[in-house]
Image (cartoon, grey):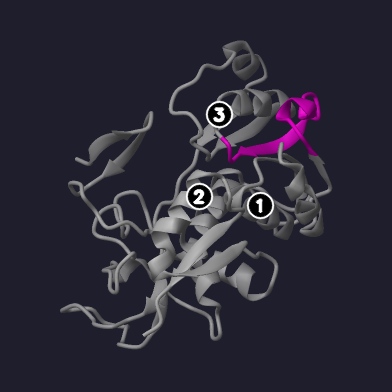
Amino acid sequence: MPQRRRLHGGVIPLTIPLPVILGHEASGTIAAVGEGVTGWAVGDAVASAISPDDAPGVSRDGAYAEYTIVSAAKLVRLPEGMDWSQAAAATDAGLTSYTGVVVYGQVGAGDRVGIVGLGGLGMTGAQIAIAQGATVVAAEPREALWETAKAHGVSEVVADVEELEGRDLDVVIDFAGFGTTTSGAIRAVKTRGRVVLVGLGRSEWTINSIDLVSRAIDLQGATVAGVPEHLEAVLALMGDGRVTVAAEEIGFADIAEGLGRLQRGEVNGRLVARLDR
């Protein structure tokens, strides 16, 4: 069973004891192939479809190192010319967003979709929903992100999810997860609508059960499941330009400083540490 270690009020499941080398979003070339592995060769450009129980930096030492190990069954071959930063971000920012929007949100053409939170995941999720043919409105308090969202095709951005109450949206995906955001999402969807929770802003919170029960709202948690076909779908959306993850490349020597920037809220999107050999 995974060991659950409490960190700053949240619970992160690890299957190996601390300390651990972090880094769960990775892309690169195969340096060696394990015994009995077929279909892959040294030099292949790949990324891995991660899951909570099988990911670098979670179930084994991660990609903040020169080499890391991934499961052959989870590998996906990168499209020709794929940007390394985009490929790495696809494995979580892309895959988690796709899982919330497409796999559990079941977003399709003509749906009216709400996105709560326009950080690295939410901005990606909005693009994926638009690529599925949905009309997207979003809730995001940081007005600096509004124009970027609209440039990606988001039709409207409001500061608080409460402003979407009564819109009778088909689906709302909560990429924030602060409790109040999920409660607001429940009030924003139609009767028998869907609310998908992706964000983990708080580990525990309460909701108004009358809102949930009286209108038969479907509340669904979502996380990646390590399905290669899902990662392939994300990479295809990136490859044809319909989805782009905001990513800034830094050097491996800058990782500690980069983590500090993330902690201080100074980064929009992803920081990608690139190791050139």
Q: Which residues are magenta?
A: 158-176
The answer to whether residue 238 is magenta is no
Which residue is located at x 41 percent, y 61 percent? 255
Locate residue 163, reporting x and y percent.
79, 27
Could you tell which of marks 2 and 3 lies nearer the N-terminus? 3
Name the residue beneath numbered marker 2. 262
Measured along the vertical axis of the image, is residue 261 above or below residue 241?
above
Quarter of the figure with the N terminus: top left
The answer to whether one can see residue 145 in this image is yes
In the displayed structure image, the side of residue 57 where residue 16 appears, left or right? left
Q: Which mark is residue 178?
A: 3
Amino acid, disc 3: Phe
Figure quadrant of residue 238: bottom right
The answer to whether one can see residue 26 in this image is no
Name the residue beneath numbered marker 1. 123
Which residue is located at x 48 percent, y 78 percent? 78
Q: Badge 1 local density, few (<14 within 10 Å), some, or many (20+)?
A: many
In the displayed structure image, the side of residue 193 where residue 13 appears, left or right? left
Figure quadrant of residue 212: top right
Which residue is located at x 39 percent, y 68 percent? 253
